[in-house]
Image (tube, rainbow, N blue to C red):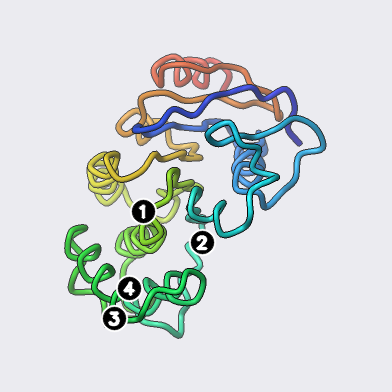
């Protein structure tokens, strides 16, 4: 599905992975997240092969927000937020709840804690899913097509909001939305047919993507 990918993902910035459908973007994301195991090559964080990292350490290093979000429909936003810290990392419900409330308030969605996923909009769902991932304070947050369910106005708001979170974590964003990538990312890669076609500034890779469209 992908081959010959050689790229660095810098800290403290938003990094875009661009390409058409079927180019290997999500496959690359799944390899980074260790949901898929590459047949050759290595993926490292802080010079450590992710294949050798214990699961709890890996999940603290890498947060993932899927295109479908996968918020638990039977849990409120607040309960979605505290589930992993309590169940996987042993935080008390009170401590996790306090952090969740602070996170939601900081991200401008403090009034959503008691709502269920079916009661919030697509843009709000994206924020909740990212807030849930940030509860574990990952080094990198991986986002798969985060604007696919958003309209143009909400996408613009989401881009501005995402840019404000660069001090919290580094983002690796898989997207086919070139204007969104231009708004939020500083560097990136362009994939075509599973191969790396361009890497560098977001302007460079968008130009390459446009020429290869």
Q: Quadrant of the C terminus?
A: top right
Q: Earlier in the sequence, mark 4 or mark 2?
A: 2
What element does badge 1 sit on? Answer: loop
- Residue identifier under label 1: 150
Q: Relative to residue 15, is residue 92 depicted above or below? A: below
Against 49, residue 191 (above or below) is above
Q: Which residue is mark 2?
A: 68
Asked if the residues shown at circle 3 and circle 1 are in contact, with their CB atoms under 8 angstroms apart, the answer is no
Mark 3–mark 2 Cα distance, whole angstroms, equals 29 Å
Q: At numbered mark 2, what does the secondary structure look like: helix, strand or loop? A: loop
Mark 3 nearby-residue class (10 Å; few <14, some 14–19, many ≥20):
few
Q: Secondary structure at mark 4?
A: helix
- Tell me if label 4 and label 1 are in contact, CB under 8 Å: no
Q: Which mark is residue 96?
A: 4
The part of the image, by quadrant, that contains residue 98 is: bottom left
First in sequence: mark 4 or mark 1?
A: 4
Q: Residues within 10 Å of mark 1 (few under 14, many from 20)?
A: some
| SS label for mark 3 | helix
- In the image, what residue occupies the spot 70% across and 30% down? 194
- Where in the figure is residue 138, as x and y percent of width and height? 43, 50
Point 64% across, 43% down: residue:
50
Numbered badge on residue 94: 3
């Amino acid at each position: 599905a992908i081959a010959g990918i050689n790229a660095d993902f810098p800290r403290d910035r938003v990094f875009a992975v661009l390409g058409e459908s079927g180019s290997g973007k999500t496959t690359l994301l799944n390899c980074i997240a260790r949901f898929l195991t590459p047949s050759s090559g290595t993926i490292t964080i802080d010079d450590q092969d992710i294949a050798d990292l214990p699961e709890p350490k890996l999940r603290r290093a890498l947060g993932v927000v899927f295109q479908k979000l996968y918020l638990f429909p039977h849990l409120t936003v607040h309960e979605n937020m505290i589930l992993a810290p309590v169940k996987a990392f042993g935080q008390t419900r009170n401590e996790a709840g306090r952090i969740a409330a602070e996170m939601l308030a900081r991200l401008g969605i403090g009034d959503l804690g008691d709502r269920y996923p079916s009661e919030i909009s697509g843009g709000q769902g994206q924020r909740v899913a990212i807030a849930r991932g940030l509860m574990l304070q990952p080094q990198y947050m991986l986002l798969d097509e985060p604007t696919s369910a958003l309209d143009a106005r909400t996408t613009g708001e989401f881009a501005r909001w995402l840019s404000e979170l660069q001090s919290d974590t580094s983002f690796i964003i898989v997207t086919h939305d070139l204007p969104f990538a231009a708004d939020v990312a500083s560097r990136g890669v362009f994939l075509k047919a599973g191969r790396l076609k361009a890497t560098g500034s977001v302007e460079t890779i968008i130009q390459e993507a446009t020429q290869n469209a």
